[in-house]
């Protein structure tokens, strides 16, 4: 019995490893960037709202909440959804099914499966 020698193309293996490392790095950097965007976006929005209030001449205190909370937003969105979907009238839908009978169809015929033999 002769030993089996496997020829390993190291260029292909190294290219695959390089592509894997670059891919994972790009995904992890994108996730980190999204984390920081979602983490600091509310602070940026609060800063813009405070600057806009200052330009208009209104005073805003540091602890004052400038935006509506999530539970209030959810209640408003639910109320709007229910209101807008009750505006439409219910329409009567009549569905008619007409049965078409076909006596013969080659797709349902069993005879082709029985008599179809391989020809050599």
Image: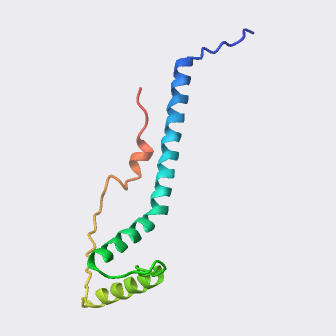
Compared across the picture, whether 15 is left or right of 109 comes to right
Residue farthest right in this picture: 1
The quarter of the image holding the C terminus is: top left
- Give the residue displayed 47% in from the left and 52% down from the top: 33
What is the basis of the colouring in this image? Answer: rainbow
Residue at the image point whose x is 37% and y is 56% from the top: 108
Quarter holding the N terminus is top right
Where 103 falls versus 73 (above or below)? above
Above or below, comparing residue 90 to residue 4 in the picture: below
Tell me the quarter of the picture where residue 99 sits: bottom left
43 with respect to 55 (left or right): right
Q: How many marks?
A: 0
Q: Whole-percent x and y of residue 119?
A: 40, 30
Q: Nearer the viewer, residue 18 or 33?
A: 33
- Name the residue rendered at 31%, 56% in the picture: 105
Give the side of residue 100 with respect to residue 62, left or right.
left
Residue 72 in picture, x, y percent from top left: 44, 85
Q: Residue furthest top?
A: 2
Q: Does residue 116 lie above or below 101 as drawn? A: above
Towards the viewer: 94 or 32: 32
Q: Is residue 91 left or right of residue 116?
A: left
């Amino acid at each position: 019995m002769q030993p089996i020698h496997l020829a390993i193309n190291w260029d292909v293996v190294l290219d695959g490893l390089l592509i894997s490392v670059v891919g994972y790095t790009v995904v992890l950097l994108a996730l980190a960037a999204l984390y920081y965007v979602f983490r600091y976006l509310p602070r940026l929005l609060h800063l813009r709202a405070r600057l806009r209030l200052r330009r208009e001449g209104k005073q805003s205190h540091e602890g004052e909440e400038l935006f509506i909370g999530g539970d209030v937003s959810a209640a408003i969105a639910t109320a709007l959804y229910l209101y807008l979907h009750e505006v439409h009238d219910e329409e009567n839908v009549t569905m008619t099914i007409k049965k078409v009978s076909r006596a013969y169809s080659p797709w349902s015929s069993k005879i082709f499966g029985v008599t179809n033999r391989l020809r050599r």
